[in-house]
Amino acid sequence: MKLLEGKTALITGATRGIGKGIAERFASEGAHVAFTFASSASKADELASSLASAHGVTVKAYQSNAASYAESEALVNQVLADFGTIDILINNAGITRDNLLMRMSEEQWDEVIEVNLKSVFNLTKACLRTFLKNKSGSIINMTSVVGVNGNAGQANYAASKAGIIGFTKSVAKELGSRNIRCNSIAPGFIQTEMTEQLGEEVVKSWIEGIPLKRGGTPEDVANACLFLASDLSSYVTGQTLHVCGGMLT
């Protein structure tokens, strides 16, 4: 039996990079997948179609702004109407607006906090009634090693990701007695479409500081997500799993 057979997962921001890797891994393990996208409907529909045909599961894409409380409520209600339930929530939506603090605008600060941190509140709150009714659920929040260590030029991003860790621990304590688990994953240097723009020398300098001497892949993060979403981690909650090749060791 597949690890997520018959489960329904809602994943935010899944048309590329880590989110796409999670959607692909979950579908391969038997999960029905609802995922969100920001702008490219054709790309999202193509992914949904390919995953459904490859794995024989139900997959549907939804255009939704995770930073909006109202849109998050509407999204969850529509997913429940389409799928019947939600068993797993992956809060993956995120952006960067990097700048030194002395040059960072209020808009750059607010946008990152709203998309990265407020979205986690929005979606978790919207799914809560279903999880409480089911007396089960796994919430996985995507944080970052930057949320633990900080990084120059990313005060907004680091603050949003550190906030996710505190939120995760608090929710785990609130909901543990209802058999609802909440964990976070802190990826390190993951090689995606975004990191391809950094240049060979920048990538090389990052990799030199990683004990495993390679960048991570979306699949590396997806495998950690699979563990936290499945019954393999039934006694794990309130934790942050670092998928960073030993970068923070």
Image (cartoon, helix red, strand yellow):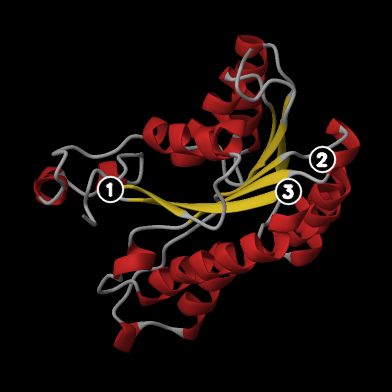
Farthest residue, direction bottom: 102
The kind of residue on which mark 2 rests is: Val
Task: Tell me the SS state at disc 1.
Answer: loop
Q: Residues within 10 Å of mark 2 (few under 14, many from 20)?
A: many
Figure quadrant of residue 26: top right
Find out whether the residues at labels 2 and 3 contact each other: C-beta distance under 8 Å: no
| Camera-nearest label, 2 or 3 | 3
Residue 189's tag is 1
- Mark closer to the chain start, 2 or 1: 2
The kind of residue on which mark 3 rests is: Asn
| The one of 193 and 118 positioned closer to us in this rendering | 118
Vertical side of 166 occupied by 15: above or below: above
Name the spot of residue 217 as percent of width and height, x first: 33, 34
Residue 79's tag is 2
For marks 2 and 1, give the CA distance.
32 Å
Vertical side of 142 occupied by 79: above or below: above
The reply to whether residue 129 is visible in this rendering is yes
The residue shown at (30%, 71%) is: 150
Name the spot of residue 180 as percent of width and height, x first: 71, 50
Figure quadrant of residue 15: top right
Name the spot of residue 153 as percent of width and height, x first: 28, 74
State the count of labels.
3
| Quarter placement of the C terminus | bottom left
Vertical side of 229 occupied by 99: above or below: below
For marks 2 and 3, give the CA distance.
22 Å
Task: Tell me the SS state at disc 3.
Answer: loop
For marks 3 and 1, give the CA distance.
32 Å
Task: Tell me the SS state at disc 2.
Answer: helix
Name the spot of residue 80 as percent of width and height, x first: 86, 40
The kind of residue on which mark 1 rests is: Phe
Q: Where does label 3 land, which residue?
A: 179
The residue shown at (31%, 50%) is: 188
